[in-house]
Amino acid sequence: MALAPQAMAQESGWYGAFDLGYHWPEAIETESSALAADGDRYKYEIQQEDNLAGFIRLGYQINPNWRVELEGGARTGDIDSIRGDASRLLVPDQICGLTPPTIPCTTPPGSIEAYTLMANVIYDFFPNSRVRPFIGAGVGINHVKADIAGRFNDNPLNGAISIDDDDTAYAYQVLAGAAFDITDRLTADVTYRYLSGTDLDLESETTANPLVIGPPGTLSGRYEDQSVTFGLRYS
């Protein structure tokens, strides 16, 4: 008696997919356009909290090994901390929450949202297997919106700072994972993504006393992120 053949990957054709998971944003290491009181630029690390990430994909399986896709992604992240260099005595080394200066520095309220549009190329290993590892790479754009409000630490006269701005940067990503057949048309994907790109420019506004501290102006830095998602792909 002949055995039934195993399910195999789609040889060619269109597919749609969505993914949901968790992401771990790296600290955004920013540098200001303006100079601080010590003659150097303001430099702050903006650290976000880990949060949810989601993606939708429209792709085409070229052959059993190769596929291409257009991917839209969304990543959110509340602000965890904004810290500078404590050794720079003339420059505030933290941005705190909007609390009285007599209270210890708290987390400034705010968030950073990143929306990506990427074109991916993916290679599937072992196309005749039910479990297929894959690797891929993508290029595209990353639109980032920051909404942050806080105050400089140390001196009450340093004043407040806010970042309510957005910018778009060129982006690239590498990805890897595994696909598992559920039915002939439905596939589960577990995917790791690493995202990076060119620098973003985010404008800050301050109520700083110019006799004490000058405004930082534009803060520039790179958005980097890692994520792991579970997705369903229908072909």
Image (cartoon, rainbow, N blue to C red):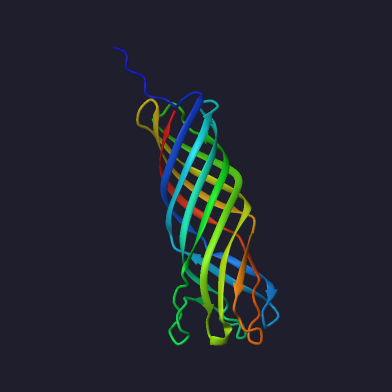
Kindly identify the residue that appears in the image at 47 percent across and 41 percent down.
56
| Residue found farthest to the front | 207
Is 4 located above or below residue 17 in the figure? above
Q: Is residue 155 visible?
A: no
Q: How many marks?
A: 0
The answer to whether residue 87 of the structure is visible from this angle is: yes
Horizontal and vertical percent position of residue 126: 46, 30
Work out whether residue 33 or residue 133 is closer to the camera in this orientation and state it. Answer: 33
Q: Residue at x 68, y 83 (%)?
A: 38
The foreground one among 92 and 26 is: 92
Residue furthest top as drawn: 1
Q: Position of residue 95 (x, y in %)?
A: 52, 76
Looking at the picture, tell me which residue is in the foreground, 220 or 191. 220
**Quadrant in which the N terminus appears:** top left
Instruction: Please state which of residues 32 and 100 is positioned toward the viewer in this rendering.
Output: 100
> Is 70 displayed left or right of 10 in the figure?
right
Image height of 72 relative to 106, above or below? above
Q: Residue furthest left?
A: 1
What is the quadrant of the C terminus in the image? top left
